[in-house]
Amino acid sequence: MTATERTANTGTTAYDVIVLAGGAAKRLGGADKPGLSVGGRSLLDRVLGACRDAGRTVVVGGRRPTARPVVWTRESPPGGGPLAALDAGTRALGSDSSTVVVLSADLPFLGAATVRRLLGALASGGREAVLLTDGEGRDQPLVAAYRTEPLRREIALLATEHGGLAGLPLRLLPPELDLARIAAESSASFDCDTWEDLSAARARIREHGHVLDEWITAVKDELGIELDVDTTLLLDLARDAAHGVARPAAPLTTFLVGYAAAAGKGPEGVADAARKAAALARRWAEEAEGAGPGTSGPDADPPAGSGRGPDRTDAG
């Protein structure tokens, strides 16, 4: 699927993405931070999942397995810092890129909604960049959307002014751009810089209000599924099948619904199959309870002369 087709299907502004996945991770003892897992997925894959509808995805850092294909590049010199990495990323995009989302690879709770907010604000505001600000109002230039040409321009000017980009702090970039800011919602700007941060992220996804969404997202990424479905509808179906038929019917029924809707029917196909299966489960339960006209449950007294129960008449 091309970037244009993705844009038409999602209604999102066409964009590319650069993910910075390098750095020494000194507070993590030099661990491979992007490869550390939260909820069974690497931090890098979690970030990539938030921008799956991007046209081109460039990751700046050492190669490692990812859930979907990306373009790899490295900053020069290796370990030269975020500005050098950002320069390498823009070079890898090609000359026809007009909008780019820039992200760090350690954002476990970044979601597609935040990416859409950044892109929407950039498209509607006429600015050169839109940055996310964290809960304390600090700029997050690695959770941001940029117009690609102004970004390239300012990186080049900084390189000329300082004789290179290696070792320059990223905070030099925002003041040079005409930018807007939007406040982070929830934990979108939370990053994992320490082992304590990683433990907090792993604990949060298991909280009651998050665990189902986290699990479903993880399974979809693992299976390569991009389908959004009504989870409440499926949970109601599982309940109806378990109560109206038998407990093992719940997982088997939801599997069959998914199988029936798999032939490119989208969320509507899942919903239609789920409604049909739920109606069947209710009819099944009504028969068992003797609820419908002309029906009798398994524990109801049999009709006279039916040949079973206390009304049975012997022939001989």
Image: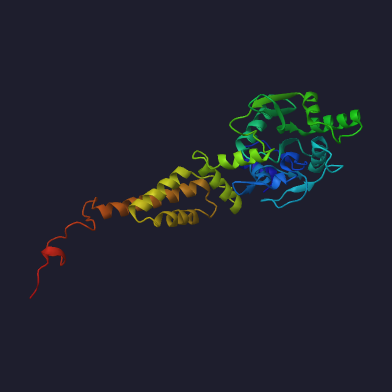
Q: How many marks?
A: 0
Q: Nearer the viewer, residue 9 or 304?
A: 304
Q: Position of residue 130 (x, y in %)?
A: 70, 28
Q: Quadrant of residue 197?
A: top right
Q: Position of residue 143 (x, y in %)?
A: 69, 33
Query: Is residue 141 rendered to the left or right of residue 219?
Result: right
* Quadrant of the drawing holding the C terminus: bottom left
Query: Is residue 2 rendered to the left or right of residue 75?
Result: left
Q: Residue at x 31, y 54 (%)?
A: 284
Q: Position of residue 188 (x, y in %)?
A: 62, 34
In the rendered image, the residue lying farthest to the bottom is 316
Q: Nearer the viewer, residue 221 or 44?
A: 44
Q: Nearer the viewer, residue 32 or 238?
A: 32
Q: Residue at x 57, y 46 (%)?
A: 217
Instruction: Establish if 151 lies above or below 52.
Output: above
Query: Is residue 32 rendered to the left or right of residue 224?
Result: right
Q: Nearer the viewer, residue 308 or 55?
A: 308
In the rendered image, the residue lying farthest to the left is 316
Render colour scheme:
rainbow
Q: Position of residue 299 (x, y in %)?
A: 21, 57
